[in-house]
Amino acid sequence: MLLKQLFKTTYWAGRIGAALGRRLGMLTATRMHRATLASVGAGSRFQPGVRFAQPGTVSVGSNCYFWRGCNASSEVADGPLIIDDGVQINQDVHLDTTGGLSLGTGVLISEGVVIYTHDHGLDPRAAPEMLPKTIAPDVWIGMRAVIMPQCRKIGPGAVIGAGAVVVHDVPAGAIVGGNPARVLGQKDHLAEVAA
């Protein structure tokens, strides 16, 4: 009985210690990013392990959330990343900002997504061709989707299915999926149901 109580106490002490460690890590990471990024809005939070290769070119709106393993990098020194309010970027997401990337209000990016904004053609050593990308408000990008450089705009309210490889622009409210991604439907009926 005493051994059981000891295990129980140890278990809960470990859980509490881990929770406090996570909280402290998030506070520390958030303070670091507030000090190094070009701007960070009120209420935005960063887990430990979020990395911005060019922090001076990153602007983050308010109430955004970044999970550990999120990485933004650029092959040029001035590739901008502009993130509006209420954006959530989950773990292990890679954002290429070489050509410039803009994320609209309320964008949700699921785990393992890769977004490219430049292309080298067939020569990996060639100078990058900058292809700026705009992801409009309220877009949801599903898990492990890949947004290729040729896709320059994803319209408002679009949904990108899990594992999709997006090579063309996505219209507003479109639901796309597959490899290469194609339009599978529209979200129009959702607006009518909500009204």
Image: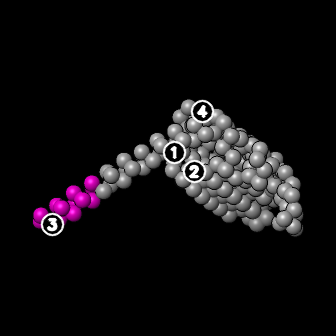
> Which of the pair 15/25 is nearer the observer?
25
The answer to whether residue 180 is visible is yes
Task: Tell me the residue that label 1 is attached to.
Answer: 29
Q: Pointer 2 and pointer 4: residues touching (CB < 8 Å)?
A: no
In the rendered image, the quadrant that contains the C terminus is top right
Closer to viewer: mark 4 or mark 1:
1
Which of label 1 and label 3 is nearer to you? 1
Label 4 to label 1: alpha-carbon separation: 15 Å
Kind of residue sitting beneath label 4: Gly
Marked residue nearer the N-terminal end (2 or 3)? 3
Location of residue 90 with respect to 181 vertically, above or below: above
Marks 1 and 3 sit apart, C-alpha to C-alpha, by: 39 Å
- What residue is rendered at 74% in x and 49% in y? 97
Q: Which residue is mark 4?
A: 41
In primary-sequence order, the first of circles 1 and 3 is 3
Quickly name the residue at label 3.
3
Q: Position of residue 148 (x, y in %)?
A: 78, 58
> What amino acid type should be assigned to the residue bearing mark 3?
Leu
Q: Looking at numbered disc 2 in the image, what kind of residue is underneath it? A: Val
Q: Secondary structure at mark 2?
A: loop
Left or right: 124 as drawn, with respect to 110 = right
Instruction: Name which residue lies at 56% across and 31% down.
Output: 42
Nearer to us: label 2 or label 3: 2
Which label number is shown at residue 50? 2
Q: As shown in the figure, which amino acid type bears the numbered disc 1?
A: Ala
Q: Do tag 4 and tag 1 residues touch (Cβ < 8 Å)?
A: no
- Which region shows up in magenta? 1-13
Task: Point out the tag, 4 or 3, that comes first from the N-terminus.
Answer: 3
Q: Is residue 143 visible?
A: no
Closer mark to the observer between disc 2 and disc 4: 2
Element carrying mark 3: helix
For disc 3, the neighbor class at 10 Å (few under 14, some 14 to 19, many from 20) is few
